Image (tube, rainbow, N blue to C red):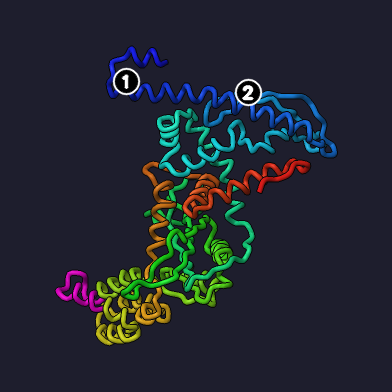
Amino acid sequence: MIGLCQAQTPTGTAAAQWEILVRTAVFKPANDLLAWLFQQAADRIDAAYQAKPGETLKRREKLEVQGIFGRFTLARDYYYQAGKQQGHFPADAALGLEGGYTPALAKLICLEGADEPAFMKAESHLQHTAGIAVSARQIQRVVQRVGIEAQVWQERPAQPGACDAKVLYVSADGTGVPMVAEELKGRRGKQPDGTAKTRQAYLGCVFTQHKVDEAGHPVRDYESTTYVSSLRPIDGFGPLLRQEAVRRGMGAVKEVVLLIDGAAGLEHMGRDCFKDSVQIVDFYHAMEHAALVLAALTGKNHTDYKQRLRRWAKRMLKDKVSRLIEEVRLESAGLAQAAAVEQELGYFIRNIKRMQYGTFRAKGYFIGSGVVEAGCKAVIGARCKQSGMRWSKPGVQNILALRCIHSSNRLADFWNYRLNSLAALNEPLSLSA
């Protein structure tokens, strides 16, 4: 290889080829070493394995394994349990093999498959950056296989956590995910014929705040945000989000703030799952509804429309929501648009207590739900709402579970759980920490 490189004219193109050649040369002995290590480990595992009742050692089988450095063949024992009609490779479970992939490569496949905007892009990225050839279809299969366990881990019973922050925030929102036709049968939607093109995916987040800045504005703690997702109805999603809040220390913190918009479903979730929290309706959603009130009262083209909207913002920030409602009712009394105005005012009437923005600001709370709205775009939209995408329910739930775990900086914890779950199939073997 050195002679070949020296014989070439030194150009940028040649230099790029040298790097690929060196990588290939380094990967070959690394792969040989890995093959030896895996075989030695499989032999020790099989020698120590104690067959469970009903299990019979049938034969020794070979498996082509792919790792980060290449492919190799692994020989290991196969046991069969006739009563359950199930087969079992103890070494596969103990070594954490995902089908024919090593644990390290399986982690990388799941990271790329869940993070890139499409499985084809993940295939290309793996090939061009790491020289690893895994097809888009295989990436999808591994992601879906591991994603099932990611859902289980995301929904695991919460162990109450500790929290020394001043405030713990809980926030939630929903967004529509495009689904295949089979998942939409009988569902009502916003299409002209009353059918649906999407299903609602809920995203919840929990984050903490220790301090405010010099101007008294709240400061979100760095990398304190964790996420959970679900395609369940709101009454199933609420307990899942509550579990995450308990896990993050909701029972130990002095103040819990629930930041949501004024949607009825989220309001009911707050009442059922976070009844002792300070509940705040997102200020920016409130302003959107203020615009609807003024549009119903005067029309958007009225000369005072924008000025009045700014006035609404200032007065809401001074706890004047009740007064604004009274003034608009008085102004619209007897007018043709009175009923329309009253309908739009309903949003404010229902949420007066949750719109005391002056009080909330004085206490140093966030009054906007931008964290979870950004999460809906980054966690759900960036992966699941690309042009032309249509998802099955299991497909989108599995990939969202992996994306939530990644965005929550919990990949290491999840994979420890995953590998220990596989190893637990071999009871005589000790589990890793």
The residue sitting at 53% across, 52% down in the picture is 410
Disc ID at residue 14? 1
Viewed as shown, does residue 409 lie left or right of 40? left
Structural crowding at the residue carrying mark 1, measured as other residues with C-alpha within 10 Å and reported as few (<14), some (14–19) or many (≥20): few
Picture residue at 61% right of the left edge, 66% below the top:
160
Which one is in front in this view, the residue at disc 2 or the one at disc 1? 1
Question: N-terminal of the two: label 2 or label 1?
Answer: 1
Amino acid type of disc 2?
Thr
State the mark number for residue 73: 2
The residues bearing labels 2 and 1 have C-alpha atoms spaced at a distance of 34 Å
Percent of width and height locating residue 105: 54, 35
Identify the residue at the far right of this view: 53
**Crowdedness near tag 2: few (<14), some (14–19) or many (≥20) residues, C-alpha within 10 Å:** some
Residue 203 point in image, percent of width and height: 47, 58
Q: Find the magenta span and give its range.
A: 297-312
Against 382, is 104 above or below?
Answer: above
Residue at (64%, 29%) from the top-left corner?
37
